[in-house]
Amino acid sequence: MTKLTTRPNSKINLGLRVVSRRPDGYHNLETVFYPIPLCDELTLETADEDEFFLEGIPVDGNPMNNLVMRVLQLLREEGKVIPPLRITLKKNIPSGAGLGGGSSDAAFMLKMLNEMFSLGLTIKEMEQWISRLGADCAVFIQNKPVFAEGIGNLFTPIDLSLSGWHFVLIKPDDFVSTKEAYSLIEPKRPNTSLIQLVNEDVNMWRERILNDFETSVFPRHPRVKDIRDELYEMGATYAAMSGSGSSVFGLFAHPVELGDLFQQYFRFQCQL
């Protein structure tokens, strides 16, 4: 019996600009994806028949439609020989949070299958293959900070480290749909690229690095804005919503004691 466990991590968006509308109805974006150590746990082991177990934070929908299972199904449809598997996915990353948890699970599933069963896919081939399941899936193949353009699927590696910063993430119960997030956005190309801005001192980010979705999300979900504002009041050097929300993160130069703050919400903190 072969068994392998991995820990698909999440990401945050450092800035997010909606720069133009596309003829296909989508939008061109600019953002920086940065990996963070809030992780799910994915275990694969050979078995007599396929089984899928979903544990941890509940996920809406039919478990068999989970992206992890979709990866397995698509590979088999394309002729890849993969034996029956017992798959256990423990969800620690909340969904609908702008953290890419589902996309990460899918990318790590592909990497695990490629390793376990010698599928022979290169990094570039895995990035191209997994992108069909979501624009941000491919970022988790190499799992490094990148500047993303297009619909969030064109990557430029960047030399960025937040090592040593104290990180706090808060996810309220609010659900923000993609349609809602785009509802009040007026696309506009920024004068200065995010690549340049993220290389500035983090103390400059508060005034310079923005998430355009906050414009439409904050008025309809005031507690998301309240969380960001409270993180600043606590001394965050930089705080913002990730993606289209509803999670909010803060970067602190000093350790943070949350105590009873935000205890009604999902909380995560660490030193990066």
Image: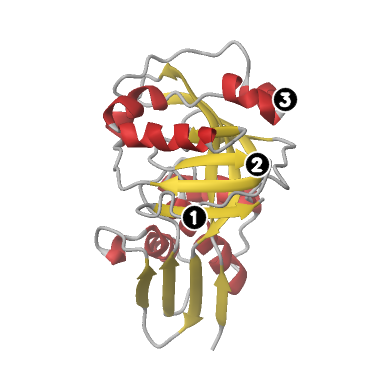
Residue located beneath label 3 in the image:
200
Mark 2 or mark 3: whose residue is earlier in sequence: 2
**Residue 53 percent coordinates (x, y):** 36, 75
* Crowd band around label 3 with a 10 angstrom C-alpha radius: few (<14), some (14–19), many (20+): few
Please name which of the two marks, 2 or 3, marks the residue nearer to the observer: 3
For the N terminus, the quadrant is bottom right
135 vs 108: above or below: above
Q: Are marks 1 and 3 in contact (CB under 8 Å)?
A: no
Query: Distance from label 2 to label 3 (Cα)?
Result: 15 Å
Query: Distance from label 1 to label 3 (Cα)?
Result: 32 Å
192 vs 200: above or below: above
Residue at left offset 38%, top offset 60%: 70
Query: Distance from label 2 to label 1 (Cα)?
Result: 31 Å
Q: What colouring style does the render use? A: secondary structure
Going by the numbered disc 1, the residue's amino acid type is: Gly
Q: Are marks 2 and 1 in contact (CB under 8 Å)?
A: no
Residue located beneath label 1 in the image:
259
**Residue 127 percent coordinates (x, y):** 57, 48
Of all residues, the one furthest to the top in this rendering is: 191
Residue at left offset 24%, top offset 59%: 61
Going by the numbered disc 2, the residue's amino acid type is: Pro
Q: Under tag 2, what secondary structure?
A: loop
Q: Nearer the viewer, residue 107 or 7?
A: 7
Mark 2 or mark 1: whose residue is earlier in sequence: 2
Q: Nearer the viewer, residue 2 or 219?
A: 219
Residue 145 image label: 2
